[in-house]
Image (cartoon, rainbow, N blue to C red):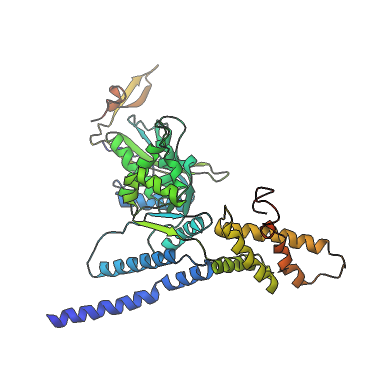
Amino acid sequence: MTGTSAQENSAVATDLAAELAASPVEELLATLDAELIGLVPVKTRIREIASLLLVERLRGSVGLSAGPPSLHMSFTGNPGTGKTTIALRMAEILHRLGYVRKGHLVAVTRDDLVGQFIGHTAPKTKEVLKRAMGGVLFIDEAYFLYRPENERDYGQEAIEILLTVMEEQRDDLVVILAGYGDRMARFFQMNPGMRSRIAHHIDFPDYAVDELLAIARLMLARMQYRLSTDGEATLAAYIERRRAQPDFANARSIRNALDRARLRHANRLVTRPDGAPLTREDLMTIEGDDLRASRVFADHAASPAAGERDS
Amino acid sequence: MRLTQGTFSFLPDLTDGQVNAQVEYCLAQGWAVSLEHTDDPHPRNTYWEMYGAPMFDLHDAAGVMTELREARATFPARYIRLNAFDATRGVETIRLSFIVNRPSREPGFRLERQEAAGRAIRYTIRSYATDRPEGERYG
């Protein structure tokens, strides 16, 4: 008797090794690591989900079953921490892990779910849900769904329909809610049913300076620009200062800063005095001066209220 | 008498799994699936009532199957058919249409003969069910 079970156990172990080798998880996580800087909690959670799905398949092969896990998620975090970016990729990830059948993403906001008059909301919400089946439904800024100040608001109706489908058709679609942390917390407080039906609450942390620098390098590489040595040091100083200022939106602020640096870079090339021929290198390289012209560095000279805040 | 209309009409009724597979095929072809219902099954009655709007932009059959479950719960004693519409320019027509729900008792049709001028006979068929007003015909 013990001999047979030992044999079975070794068979399962080899299966696991084979499944691990065949699973796209490692490759998937490698691309995520290459293309997305930081975001450790998110990557950990994706790894856990991948492992669970793998183990669930193995358990199925030896006759153990627990049903499909619930993968509804909520993404919370400050502006520019990559919530939307990850959500957009989540459909593809879950599809490759074999959890959702089709792997498309339907991104909606309040307007797509909530109607304008009585009887308008249910068909609208149901249509969106039907479109999302087999894939991922992404509700950005989900807290707008619920407006406690207006008791005749139809958002509540949309939430109730969502809840039913999230509960009953768990294997047909995955719902991801995203929004800023404090507002989402209030939203869940008002809708405890929603909170309990979402198994994965993932918080997106703010980026550290070196992570933001790495993000900037990645963005520039994608646009086929690069930073000079001076430019690199200036950008680091820029990030330090910009982080301390109000309305800092993590990666989004960096992207905006780089876009403005590109403008100054272009202007510098066009108005340069000597008129020497431009090299490929000139066209690619963003210098420290392109960044140093930013208002962030002139902080002490001018008051922050003057002019555009981000320039 | 079992009503036979549309595609697969001489096959036994499709199971939910088979309907699901047909819908998957329709969606893969880019057709929009819709549901219609009626309690007047005369073969020339082409205008059945729509159950909800046609479902555009679907990727998975689960959405249609949800709608079908609701339609069956709402009209258990009516005929429900599933249509797939091909919007390709120049085609723009129903490609596939089959019955997915039928009343438990189907009384069938009566053949009526009308004696016309001379010794001519005109034939027409009339559903026994339509003797009663709409909504009270089956079940």
Horizontal and vertical percent for residue A9?
22, 78
Residue placed furthest toward the bottom: A3
- The residue that appears at 74% across and 60% down in the rendered structure is A264
* In-image side of B14 versus A108 (left or right): left
The quadrant of the rendering that contains the C terminus of chain A is bottom right
- The residue that appears at 16% across and 80% down in the rendered structure is A4
Image quarter of residue B110: top left
Residue placed furthest toward the right: A274
Residue placed furthest toward the left: A1
Horizontal and vertical percent for residue A229?
68, 74
The quadrant of the rendering that contains the N terminus of chain A is bottom left
Vertical comparison of A296 with B98: above or below: below
Depth check: A116 or B125 in front?
Answer: A116
Depth check: A298 or A119 in front?
Answer: A298
Q: From where the camera sits, is residue B133 visible?
A: yes
- The residue that appears at 70% across and 53% down in the rendered structure is A302
Vertical comparison of B99 with A207: above or below: above
Depth check: B93 or A108 in front?
Answer: A108
Vertical comparison of A134 with A231: above or below: above
Residue placed furthest toward the top: B117
Depth check: A258 or A7 in front?
Answer: A258
Horizontal and vertical percent for residue B37?
36, 34
* In-image side of A261 versus A279 (left or right): left
Image quarter of residue B4: top left
Horizontal and vertical percent for residue B48?
40, 32
Image quarter of residue A203: bottom left
Total marks drawn?
0
Q: From where the camera sits, is residue B26 visible?
A: no
